[in-house]
Amino acid sequence: MSDDVRKVVRKRYGERAKSGDCGCSSSRSCCGGVRSTSEAIGYSADELRAIPKGADLGLGCGNPTALASLREGDVVLDLGSGAGIDCFLAAEKVGPTGRAIGVDMTAEMVERARENARREGVTNVEFRLGEIEHLPVADASVDVIISNCVVNLSPDKPQVFREAYRVLKRGGRMFLSDIVLRKELPRTVRNSIEAYVGCVAGASLQTEYLAAIRAAGFDDVEIVKETTAEASSGSRSTAPTFVLDGQEVAPADLGLTPEAAVDFAGCVASVTVKAAKRT
């Protein structure tokens, strides 16, 4: 991510933290509200009731904690923790002897998450300001890493995975819900800041994403859940619209013809990936 793009992403998510608006989702609009968006991507009604008010901004594309098999006493690290939804769910699962740590590069998000924890009296979570390419976390100190629709925003995903490997303990596990590509995006989309902030233009090809995890040293790399993004409406004669950064975007805004827009919908997939650090 260039400095200019990083500034745009930080600014947009800082505004999101202040306003509470919902954000990108791989396949659904936020028009039905944050809760309905979160339920659509895998959170249960019970989970959404259990988290502090204001912790869910509708920014995810999955529910990594649902598949992580967290245990009492685990130390969990959330890459790009936002307002804290996944950290709070993890904290409940690991109990008072465990800990959930969130790292986010947006100061407003970190402060919102900390305030959520203070208000609800959740003491086994902490939120740290930092970039996921340079984690403010000690070597071999974490049992489980989770992340929700964040790694796709990084321009240096191999470095993210190397850092994840560094901070995991031997035998540690990683569960990432993220956006990947099944084929290359049209250049106009990849060059769009709006699409980047909306969790599309920064995504990697699925094969490259998985290869980068393996190259960092991880074993047992596997996709455990996958959903292909679909356009909200339209056909080859009537262009669909897409939800990017919580906003409906017409294909023309991305330089796409109606026909190309339908093809574009099949480019993008939401996946949950698991991996392990054996040694």
Image (cartoon, rainbow, N blue to C red):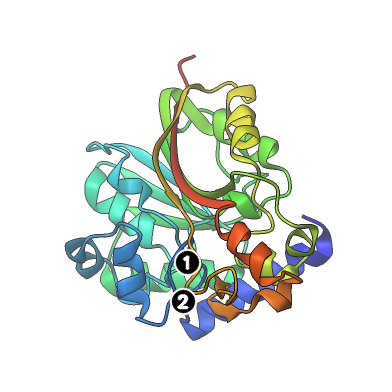
- Give the farthest residue toward the bottom: 19
Residue 45 as seen in the image, left or right of residue 224: left
Q: Secondary structure at mark 2?
A: loop
Tell me which amino acid carries mark 2. Cys
Residue 230 as seen in the image, left or right of residue 160: left
Q: Residue at x 72, y 78 (%)?
A: 253
Residue 75 percent coordinates (x, y): 37, 39
Q: Nearer the viewer, residue 222 or 160?
A: 222
**In the picture, which quadrant includes the N terminus?**
bottom right
Q: Residue at x 73, y 63 (%)?
A: 189
Q: Is residue 157 visible?
A: yes
In the rendered image of this protein, does residue 190 appear above or below residue 142? below
Q: Quarter-wise, where is residue 261 in the image? A: bottom right
Q: Decide: marks 2, 1 in contact (CB < 8 A)?
A: yes
Residue 187 percent coordinates (x, y): 79, 58
Residue 22's tag is 2
Q: Nearer the viewer, residue 138 or 158?
A: 158
Disc 1: which residue:
59
Q: Residue at x 51, y 55 (%)?
A: 149
Q: Residue at x 53, y 23 (%)?
A: 218
Residue 236 percent coordinates (x, y): 59, 68
Count of numbered marks: 2
Residue 79 percent coordinates (x, y): 52, 49
In the rendered image of this protein, does residue 204 appear above or below residue 38? above
Residue 228's tag is none
Give the Cα distance between marks 2 and 1.
6 Å
